[in-house]
Image (spheres, grey):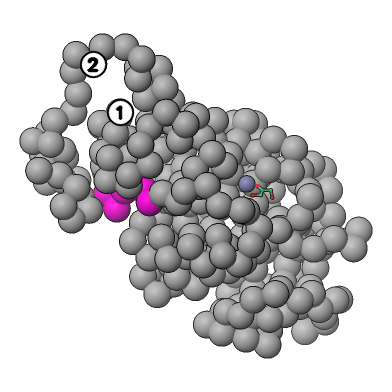
Amino acid sequence: MKDIMTAPFLVEMIRTCTNMYNHGWDERNGGNISLMLDESEVAEYGDVKRVLRTIPTGFKAPSLDGKYFLVTGTGKYFKNVQYEPAVNLGLVKIADGGENAQLLWGFTDGGKFTSEFPAHMMSHAARLTVNPSNRVIMHCHPTNLLAMTYVHTLDEKAFTRTLWQMCTECIVVFPDGVNVLPWMLCGTNEIGEATAEKMKTARLVVWAQHGLYGAGVDLDEAFGLIETAEKAAEIYMKIAHLPLVNTITDEQMHLLEGRFSVKAREGYLS
Ligand code: 2HA
Ligand code: ZN
């Protein structure tokens, strides 16, 4: 049996947490990540049938029954994941229709998964219905996107169009756009259900005055999506108070659709 500390999924998770911390998106205990793993991936690293603890989740997610997730811990700092992965991360198997998570590795100080576990698991279930290859849900507090939610309308079409107009690459990277939730109490099943509903039509969901959720087939894709949207928001925050002289027109967006074989969200371009 191989040492889990050498597992590519664990190494990549640690690197991603460190990278996100270094971007300033995950101050203190801000942000959380869940990465779905295949049983065959997990089986290489120790006896996955040994349940260390069973942790109630407080929600149901029947479609995730039996699925494995590497997930960041509640109250834990992304800054510290690289130094103590086994304290700050946990590997769980979802059981009993989603009502319990069986801890197989990690959370060695008696901790448990992120307070945003409902939003993560419900979003996984939602994304899997759209794309069976989805593996990652990622939440963080990117500075400029957060700032943007204070000064820009939260209308999803308008928000998406503004981001698309800020960098040429945006419509190529997220042609599905961004969905937006108004301010809601975080850590609840309600915000989890609302996020999951929004995840059915876009891989990026803004939580106004809080942060952002991204989904992807791997950590790189989810990170890259957030990185691109945050870059666009940064440009917006640099120019929003200045007279706008140029932009990317809808006609140019259509040229990008053709060149990169993407289709912009229905009804978002004229
Ligand atoms: O886990 O980011 O939304 C800390 C958070 C809560
Ligand atoms: Zn948060």
Residue picked out by circle 1 = 166
Report the Cα–Cα distance between label 1 and label 2: 11 Å
* Residue 167 x/y as whole percent: 30, 29
Residue 113 at x, y = what percent?
74, 62
Q: Quadrant of the C terminus?
A: top left
Left or right for 106, reference 59: right
| Most frequent secondary structure within the magenta stretch | loop
Q: Residue at x 41, y 60 (%)?
A: 198
- The tag on residue 244 is 2
Left or right: where 62 falls relative to 256 = right
Question: Residue flagged by tag 2: what amino acid is it?
Answer: Leu
**Front residue of this view, candidates 44 and 23:** 23
Mark 1 vs mark 2: give the one in front: 2
Question: Residue 172: horizontal and vertical position, in percent?
Answer: 27, 43
Going from N to C along the chain, the mark reached first, 1 or 2, is 1
As shown in the figure, which amino acid type bears the numbered disc 1?
Met
- Asked whether, in this view, residue 72 is left or right of residue 240, the answer is right
For the point 84% across and 55% down, the residue is 87
Label 2 Cα crowd, 10 Å radius (few <14 / some 14-19 / many 20+): few
Which residue is at the front of the view, 17 or 197?
A: 197
Left or right? Give the position of 68 relative to 258.
right
| Residue 166 sits in quarter | top left
What percent of the width, then of the height, locates residue 210?
57, 42
Label 2 secondary element = loop
Name the secondary structure under disc 1. Answer: helix
Q: Which residues are magenta?
A: 174-179
Task: Please state, as top left, top right, bottom left or bottom right, where the N terminus lies in the image.
Answer: bottom right
The reply to whether residue 8 is in sight is: no
